[in-house]
Image (cartoon, rainbow, N blue to C red):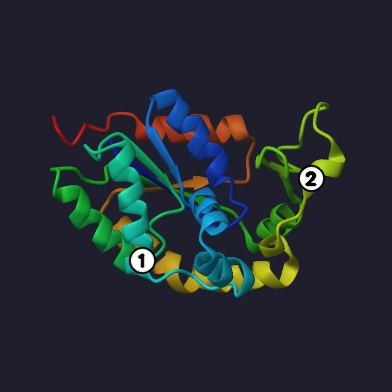
Amino acid sequence: MNILVLGALGSGKGTQARIIAEKLNLFYFESGKFLRTLAKSDSSIDERINKKGELLPDEEMFSLLTKHIEKENPTRDNLLLEGYPRSIKQYELLKDWLAEKSQRIDRVIFLEISEKEIMKRTSARRVDRKTGKIYNMITNPPGAGVDPDDLSQRPDDKPEAIKKRLEWFKESVLPLVDVLEKEGILKRVDGERPIKTISEDILSKLGGIEDAND
């Protein structure tokens, strides 16, 4: 079973992807964290995505992703990809790559939230500088053991950056969502509910999926 979890910034896709991956014992790939890790060791990537706010070209992002997954999961199955693909071109590349191992995307979960909710959630998002863990001061606040002084706001979670990312989401990801829906593999999920309710809904929508190898 190979699953994609997509959604706008602040939709909770990372939280839900981690829950689902753990429950179903899937190989979890988080695109945002992957890029942030790369940026720490590659000044060129850091310059482009963090300082200039650019997106990596489709082919470059695909190459980086597949090299990483090949090392950890060469059979290319039981994958849960969160936040990737981000365009129709990336999806086409991913499909062809999976097909080389007789694999496919079995289900896509798309978390829907309003623009108002996006602005509210992302402006409340904080990162623990020590652990790298992401919290939301509204929907997923840190526990008592977390030092508030260790929490910071990412540059791309500030209002102007949020608006820019939202425009990109509309131009690149929403057309992909339309394609996935026409293929019959996408399920829309209301992302403006409690975390547990959403994860239960997702699990119910994943029920009955046959493994591509069956």
Residue lying at 59% horizontally and 50% vertically, measured from the top left:
11
Instruction: Give how far across and how far down residue 72 sits, in percent.
Output: 33, 37
Instruction: Give how far across and how far down residue 105 sits, in percent.
Output: 27, 46
Secondary structure found at label 1: helix
Q: Nearer the viewer, residue 45 or 34?
A: 45
Question: Above or below — where is 173 with respect to 18?
Answer: below
Q: Earlier in the sequence, mark 1 or mark 2?
A: 1
Kindly identify which residue carries mark 2: 151
- In the rendered structure, which amino acid carries the disc numbered 1? Glu
- Residue 178: quadrant of the picture: bottom left
Question: Above or below — where is 209 with respect to 180?
Answer: above
Binning the other alpha carbons within 10 Å of mark 2 as few (below 14), some (14 to 19) or many (20 upward) gives: many
What's the distance in space between the residues labelled 1 and 2, CA to CA?
32 Å
Residue lying at 61% horizontally and 66% vertically, measured from the top left:
50
Tell me if 162 is positioned left or right of 44 in this view.
right
Secondary structure found at label 2: strand
Question: Above or below — where is 165 with respect to 33?
Answer: below
